């Protein structure tokens, strides 16, 4: 009999989700700062899932834990280990990590299986497998992803405990642990590259003269793209500007002030002059106040002519676009100085491009790439000449730095040894391999720098930070009209020093044992030997990884092709076999769908053959259901994933929602942006699994889904994600059968099963209404019919009587207003701020939720926590924390189905903020000794 693993029984979701969300704000030393990758899973989630895949649940050992109480006690102990190890600050705490490793060894007889992620991407899962002491194998078709994985799990173990070889560094401290010496050399040789590059091209970055005559280092130059105004009576070189704003700190506002002046040197006889304004009263009204009006086109600053977007495209595509310097940002004492451009600053950028630079054509997929439509068709077109000179200089210096590392390593006493590329796992590392390793990280530094050194880099003018915003602020290459050209030698965002420091700190925090492997293979080929899968597959056509990563690949190829020749042998990233449903690559939507689905089936069929006995695999998924048909709501992404797994002989044994976004993020209701990923645990379905009919399947669904949904809701699943999360337990029922037969004898499809699961979800949510008090049941029913709009008193009276309450009492309670034969629920925003939940003679769950939404939106987490603590402390009424959250889930579903976006966002935000609200409530209860110790289930 197979032992159930912890992932199949219980997880401490609140702790995992809290730390996963918090990780988004952690930068220093976090592996994500090694190099950008899209849609990374949180390290905390991956660490917890891997641990739970391998560690036995106490119920698997009835001889040691014979009672449910004993099992619960032991499970709580294992959960405390997870709660400790998911905290980012504990990743280098050997006591914490050794406790986790010991449990894994105890549950695997001392020989845990190797871990494989065939869709390794940014390397989160292989890295955390290595951190837990497991044999980690990463595979990806994309060479940029493979390089990142090599840098994470393959290179550091080869140089574990090495001292740095940079002259004078080895003796600066007592000892060098793990990858600390390697990281120190990345930092030191990165500084050498900075200094050497400045010696060669520093004159291209002149200082600025401030109003008092002193010189200041320039942080950035703010440019605007321009085209000639099509108005024959004007013909001015018109700037294309998204926003005139430069800085919005209160009392230090700065913005560009354009004006038209005469200039005989221009064909039109005039030009646009740019000055800097600081008077907040005369500042632009909106952030978007510029000359570009999105897809509507542009407006000429001189004559006011409306200019169509197509004209701008035609001009720029024909090479008739230009650019003009609008402002210079200079260093100041705890502030930025914004200066009008002058001739010297403008001419410093007028240089020829380097003779040898990057090569490669940008994909013409308009979903992800806007620049080609405006004539920027080559990757070199995305950089100014000065940026190309700087980046090629740094790129060339990586090779020179490698030769210095080699010489210094030999001088430090290391033997030459083999090169890093293709080095056997058991080969001793020497100076050659070490030089390759340091150069590889320096290559990542240059690649990272390109993300901040492009003409698609913009200037952030928000009050919190006035800095360069990187190109990939989202998973696309959008067009930038006004852009910021940073100074790579100034120690700020977008500088070579910041990039080298970030990479070095990431390396310093990496585990350095055991040795991991990262290979360039497609997923089908990678699943070939017995290994335990834990993977985050691509989401249908959500992200074009190969097309996007070409931006970095062209620089990495130029920099590292001699050091990592196996990875950089092609002009651009391989694309044909990439498992993404890309219509532009596979003959349209139907061809892309067929390619993707066939590939998925092959991956999971091979995984079924080489599955490690006694362990469940784990698959992450986060694609929102978006398709509607005669069968009901479903999703091509989900359908494909599940079809591929079920047809390949897998059954779902557990499903868990894990938060991957911070609670402060505004969820875009109705989009595919989810706050949570769903982790599915799967085991091979037995060959003799029974079949059932439609009636038996629906009966099992209705029996099992209610309890599963309550667990999901208690696990902090966001309401916007509940339909996705419900797929797990629903498909767990469906996948346990070899076949589910429809009434006509045909086999039920996954799409039909998904539709039935969604129907049952709505039934279960409706049935949950019976758990609420009478006023809340009335308010739910009225809300379904009217939202917060008015309805007739007679209808309300009938509805209230049926629920054993009265409209008059609901009016007195402040739930609704009843006037002149009209009844209307009171919106949260319209509730009285003077309301005191501690003295209200009749408190309902509806009232608490509505006021809690109001307080959260006006007073934040602290105010919401204090309000909740006061509500739960009431001993004379029954208000339960779980019921408040369940009501928010239910109202979200009603609002989403009716298109009431504002209401949906409010309820969704409350649930995603729930762990923080609970923490604030506990703090408020502790500070008020009269409240005692609340456990937040309505009891003291």
Image (cartoon, rainbow, N blue to C red):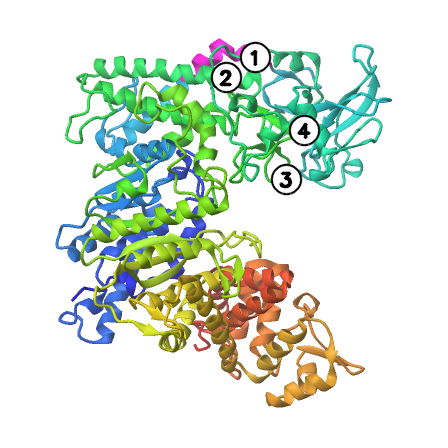
- Residue appearing at x 57%, y 10% in the figure: 352
Q: Residues within 10 Å of mark 2 (few under 14, many from 20)?
A: many
Instruction: Name above or below for residue 599 compared with residue 873.
Output: above
Separation (CA) of disc 2 from disc 3: 30 Å
Secondary structure of the residue carrying tag 1 is: helix
Work out whether residue 301 can be spotted: yes
Residue 615 lies in quadrant: bottom left
Q: Which residue is mark 3?
A: 463
Tell me the tag on residue 390. Answer: 2
Tell me the tag on residue 313. Answer: 4
Secondary structure of the residue carrying tag 4 is: helix
Work out whether residue 85 can be spotted: no
Mark 1 near mark 2, Cβ–Cβ under 8 Å? yes
Q: Which residue is mark 1?
A: 204
From the viewer's perspective, tell me whether residue 523 is left or right of residue 35. Answer: left
Which of discs 3 and 4 lies nearer the camera? The answer is: 4
Instruction: Name above or below for residue 600 compared with residue 411.
Output: below
Instruction: Name above or below for residue 395 compared with residue 65.
Output: above
- Residue appearing at x 32%, y 45% in the figure: 125
**Residue range (magenta):** 193-206
Tell me the tag on residue 847. Answer: none
Task: Tell whether position 612 is magenta.
Answer: no
């Amino acid at each position: 009999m197979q032992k159930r693993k912890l992932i199949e029984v219980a997880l401490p979701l609140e702790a995992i989700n809290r730390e996963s969300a918090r990780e988004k704000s952690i930068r220093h030393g976090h592996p994500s700062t090694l190099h950008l990758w899209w849609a990374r899973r949180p390290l905390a989630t991956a660490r917890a899932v891997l641990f739970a895949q391998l560690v036995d649940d106490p119920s698997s050992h009835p001889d040691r834990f014979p009672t449910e109480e004993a099992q619960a006690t032991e499970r709580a102990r294992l959960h405390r280990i997870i709660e400790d190890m998911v905290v980012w600050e504990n990743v280098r705490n050997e006591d914490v990590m050794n406790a986790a490793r010991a449990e894994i060894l105890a549950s695997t007889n001392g020989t845990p299986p190797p871990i494989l992620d065939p869709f390794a991407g940014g390397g989160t899962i292989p890295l955390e497998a290595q951190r837990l002491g497991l044999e980690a194998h990463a595979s990806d078709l994309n060479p940029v992803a493979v390089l990142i994985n090599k840098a994470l799990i393959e290179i550091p173990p080869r140089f574990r405990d090495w001292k740095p070889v940079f002259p004078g560094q080895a003796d600066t401290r007592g000892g060098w642990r793990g990858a600390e010496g390697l990281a120190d050399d990345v930092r030191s040789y990165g500084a050498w590259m900075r200094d050497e590059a400045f010696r060669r091209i520093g004159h291209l970055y002149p200082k600025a003269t401030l109003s008092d005559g002193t010189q200041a280092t320039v942080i950035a130059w703010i440019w605007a793209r321009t085209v000639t105004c099509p108005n024959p009576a004007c013909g001015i070189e018109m700037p294309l500007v998204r926003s005139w704003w430069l800085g919005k700190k209160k009392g230090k506002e700065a913005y560009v002030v354009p004006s038209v002046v005469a200039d005989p040197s221009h064909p039109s006889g005039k030009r646009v002059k740019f000055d800097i304004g600081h008077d907040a009263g005369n500042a632009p009204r909106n952030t978007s106040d510029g000359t570009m009006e999105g897809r509507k086109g542009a407006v000429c600053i001189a004559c006011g002519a409306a200019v169509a977007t197509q004209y701008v495209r035609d001009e720029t595509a024909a090479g008739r676009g230009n650019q003009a310097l609008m402002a210079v940002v200079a260093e100041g004492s705890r502030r930025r100085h914004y200066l009008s451009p002058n001739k010297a600053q403008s001419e410093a950028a007028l240089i020829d491009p380097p003779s040898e630079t990057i090569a490669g054509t940008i994909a013409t997929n308009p979903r992800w790439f806007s620049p080609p439509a405006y004539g920027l068709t080559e990757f070199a077109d995305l950089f100014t000449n000065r940026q190309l000179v700087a980046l090629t200089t740094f790129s060339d210096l990586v090779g020179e730095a490698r030769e210095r590392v080699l010489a210094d390593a030999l001088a430090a006493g290391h033997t030459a040894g083999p090169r890093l590329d293709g080095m056997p796992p058991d080969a001793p590392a020497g100076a050659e391999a070490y030089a390759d390793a340091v150069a590889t990280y320096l290559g990542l530094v240059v690649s990272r720098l390109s993300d901040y050194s492009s003409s698609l880099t913009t200037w952030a003018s928000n009050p919190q930070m006035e800095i360069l915003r990187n190109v990939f602020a989202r998973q696309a290459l959008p067009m930038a009209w006004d852009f910021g050209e940073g100074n790579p030698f100034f120690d700020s965002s977008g500088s070579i020093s910041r990039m080298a420091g970030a990479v070095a700190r990431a390396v310093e925090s990496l585990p350095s044992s055991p040795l991991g492997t990262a290979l360039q293979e497609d997923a089908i080929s990678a699943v070939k030997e017995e290994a335990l899968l834990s993977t985050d597959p691509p989401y249908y056509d959500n992200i074009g990884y190969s097309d996007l990563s070409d931006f970095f690949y062209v620089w990495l190829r130029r920099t590292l092709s001699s050091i990592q020749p196996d990875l950089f042998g092609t002009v651009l990233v391989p694309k044909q076999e990439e498992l993404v449903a890309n219509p532009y690559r596979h003959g349209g939507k139907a061809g892309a769908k067929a390619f993707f689905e066939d590939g998925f089936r092959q991956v999971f069929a091979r995984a079924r053959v080489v599955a490690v006995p006694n362990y469940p695999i784990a698959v992450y998924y986060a694609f929102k259901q978006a398709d509607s048909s005669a069968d009901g709501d479903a999703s091509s992404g989900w359908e494909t994933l599940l079809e591929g797994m079920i047809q390949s002989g897998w059954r779902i044994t557990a499903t868990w929602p894990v938060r991957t976004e911070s609670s402060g993020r505004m969820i875009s209701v109705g989009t595919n942006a989810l706050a949570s990923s769903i982790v599915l645990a799967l085991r091979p379905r037995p060959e003799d699994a029974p079949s059932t009919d439609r009636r038996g399947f629906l009966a099992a669904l209705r029996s099992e889904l209610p309890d599963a949904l309550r667990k999901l809701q208690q696990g902090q699943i966001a309401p916007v994600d509940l339909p996705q999360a419900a797929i797990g337990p629903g498909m767990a029922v469906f996948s346990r059968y070899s076949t589910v037969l429809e009434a006509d004898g045909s086999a039920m499809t996954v799409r039909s099963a998904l539709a039935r699961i969604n129907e049952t979800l709505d039934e279960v949510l409706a049935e949950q209404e019976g758990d609420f008090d009478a006023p809340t049941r009335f308010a739910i029913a009225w809300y379904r019919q009217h939202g917060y709009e008015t309805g007739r008193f007679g209808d309300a009276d009938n509805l209230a009587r049926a629920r054993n309450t009265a409209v008059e009492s609901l009016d007195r309670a402040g739930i609704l207003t009843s006037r002149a034969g009209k009844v209307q629920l009171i919106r949260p925003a319209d509730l009285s701020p003077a309301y005191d939940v501690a003295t209200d003679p009749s408190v309902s769950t509806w009232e608490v939720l509505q006021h809690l939404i109001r307080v959260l939106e006006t007073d934040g987490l602290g105010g919401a926590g204090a309000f909740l603590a006061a509500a739960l402390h009431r001993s004379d009424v029954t208000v339960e924390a779980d019921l408040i959250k369940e009501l928010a889930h239910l109202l979200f579903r009603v609002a989403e189905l009716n298109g009431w976006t504002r209401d949906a966002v409010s309820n969704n935000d409350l649930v995603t903020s729930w762990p923080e609200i609970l923490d604030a409530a506990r703090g408020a209860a502790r500070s008020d000794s009269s409240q005692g110790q609340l456990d937040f289930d309505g009891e003291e």
